[in-house]
Amino acid sequence: MDNIKVSIFVESRYKVNRKRITRAVKKLLKENNVLGPAEVSVAIVGDRKMKSLNKKYKGKDKTTNVLSFCLSEGESSSMPTDVLWLGDVVVSYPEVIEEASKEQKLVDDKIEELVNHGVLHLLGIHHEE
């Protein structure tokens, strides 16, 4: 699993368990037969950034809990180094707080749930709308 890289960006005021996110992503990729070398980026952002991303890429003027940006849009993508670059998962921390509270979940559990949801989208596994 050392050949799977998880890059994590967190806006400074948010507290997240980076090791847990990394473990969750690696476990999910392994369960879906992605053994590496592969890379995924995870960003934990505020609602203003999430709203901006939604407006720019999805045409929606609102915030959401998670967005996935697949580099290949359905095709496997390899960089010149033969690393499978899956793409980016962006999670709104304020949305996490609100949903965790409503669902009576721990914040770290909700973050992991949303990151996993986003990674599944990167793998082309989509839920029913």
Image (cartoon, rainbow, N blue to C red):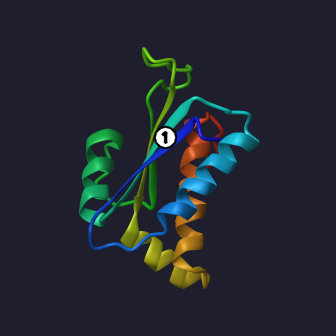
* Whether residue 34 is visible: yes
| Residue 103 in the figure: left or right of residue 98 | right
Count of numbered marks: 1
Closer to us: 118 or 58 = 118
Q: Is residue 109 above or below residue 106?
A: above
Q: Name the outermost residue toward the top.
A: 80
* Whether residue 128 is visible: no
Q: Residue at x 62, y 30 (%)?
A: 36
* Quarter containing the N terminus: top right
Q: Position of residue 31 (x, y in %)?
A: 75, 43
How many residues crowd mark 1 within 10 Å: few (<14), some (14–19), many (20+)?
Answer: many
Closer to us: 33 or 67 = 33
Q: Residue at x 62, y 56 (%)?
A: 24
Q: Position of residue 103 (x, y in %)?
A: 60, 80
Q: Position of residue 122 (x, y in %)?
A: 55, 37
Closer to us: 90 or 80 = 80
Secondary element at tag 1: strand
Q: Is residue 60 above or below residue 4?
A: below
Q: Residue at x 39, y 69 (%)?
A: 93
Q: Residue at x 59, y 50 (%)?
A: 25
Label 1 sits on what residue type? Val
Q: Position of residue 70 (x, y in %)?
A: 47, 33
Closer to us: 62 or 95 = 95
Report which residue position mark 1 lands on: 40
